Image: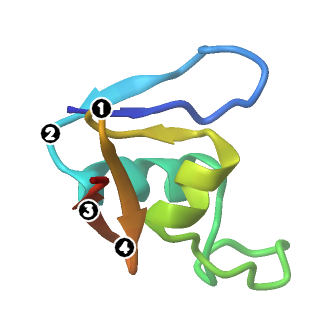
Amino acid sequence: MFYAKPKLNNSHDAQTFDTVTEAVKYLNEYNEMGSEYEGNNSVAKLKAEDWWLLGKLVGPEGTEFRDNKLVEVK
């Protein structure tokens, strides 16, 4: 399970997802990231590791993200 928390200061609108792809899509859409949103000067969509570093995406314990893929930490 992947926990996507779109806001930094609270858990309002936070959701859990079965796949990292669904979680990243939700975060990008919620925060209007990507060229399809007018008025944001074409801010690039963020990857899983970006959301994870920002503290907005949490994966299973003992894992982290690299190149938009889940990897286990040894």
Say which label, 2 or 4, has the lower sequence index: 2
Please, what secondary structure does the residue beneath circle 4 have?
Answer: loop
- The residue beneath circle 3 is 71
Mark found first going from the N terminus, 1 or 4: 1
Whole-angstrom CA distance, mark 1 to mark 3, is 11 Å
- Badge 1 marks a residue whose secondary structure is loop
- Residue at screen point 54% across, 30% down: 5
Q: CA distance from mark 1 to mark 4?
A: 17 Å
Residue 70 is situated, as x and y percent measured from the top left of the image, at 26, 61
Q: Which amino acid, by three-letter code, is at mark 1?
A: Glu
Q: CA distance from mark 2 to mark 4?
A: 15 Å
Of labels 1 and 3, earlier in sequence is 1
Residue 19 located left or right of residue 3: left
- Few, some or many C-alpha atoms within 10 Å of disc 3 (few <14, some 14-19, many ≥20)? few
Q: Secondary structure at mark 3?
A: strand
Note whether 14 is above or below 2 in the view shown: above
Q: Amino acid at mark 3?
A: Val
> Which of labels 1 and 2 is toward the front?
1
Callout 4, which amino acid? Asn
Res 18 label: 2
Residue 50 in which image quadrant: bottom right
Of residues 63 and 26, the one drawn nearer to the viewer in this rendering: 63
The residue that label 1 is drawn on is 61
Quadrant position of residue 56: top right
- Would you place residue 52 above or below residue 34 in this image? above
Marks 4, 3: nearer the viewer: 3
